[in-house]
Amino acid sequence: MNDLPGYEITEVLGEVFGLTVRSRNVGSQLGASLKSLVGGELKGMTKMLADGRQHAQDRLMEEAGSKGADAVVAFRFDTSELGGTWTEICAYGTAVRARKRM
């Protein structure tokens, strides 16, 4: 969200992000290659990406907390592939301080 319903943003603390780069193991790559021939979900890859997203989000929350933020607005994920075997996962947003509206 770009706002916080019921809250007023009192201070913008700036951009925060959490980043992780994940490597696929050889077995996972081979299994994914074979699975792509017949179709279906690549469960190992799905788990790797879900774990990576959580790790990136945890790092973002740590950075926001270190800046004294109460919340992060405009939160997003970005994922890209590096070199065919690495996946970069970035969580980013804007750290803010907020207070409940009266």
Image (cartoon, helix red, strand yellow):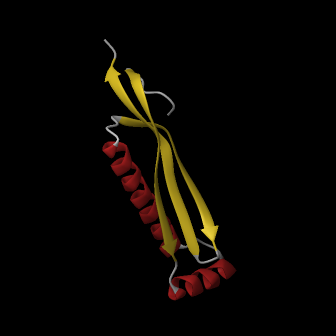
Q: Residue at x 37, y 49 (%)?
A: 63
Residue 17, percent from left and from top = 47, 50
Report whether 63 appears left or right of 15.
left
Report whether 99 appears left or right of 78.
left
Residue 88, percent from left and from top = 55, 65
Report whether 44 appears left or right of 61.
right
Above or below, 96 relative to 50: above
Q: Residue at x 68, y 81 (%)?
A: 37
Above or below, 12 relative to 75: above
Image label count: 0
Q: Front-most of 16 and 32?
A: 16
| Picture quadrant where residue 101 is located | top left
- Residue lying at the far top in this picture: please name it: 102
Is residue 41 visible to the viewer in this orientation of the structure?
no
Q: Residue at x 56, y 84 (%)?
A: 31
Residue 22, percent from left and from top = 49, 71
Is residue 89 visible to the viewer in this orientation of the structure?
yes
Q: Front-most of 48 and 77?
A: 77
Q: Front-most of 39 and 28?
A: 28
Which quadrant would the C terminus be assigned to in this image? top left
Report whether 28 appears left or right of 102.
right
Q: Residue at x 55, y 73 (%)?
A: 42
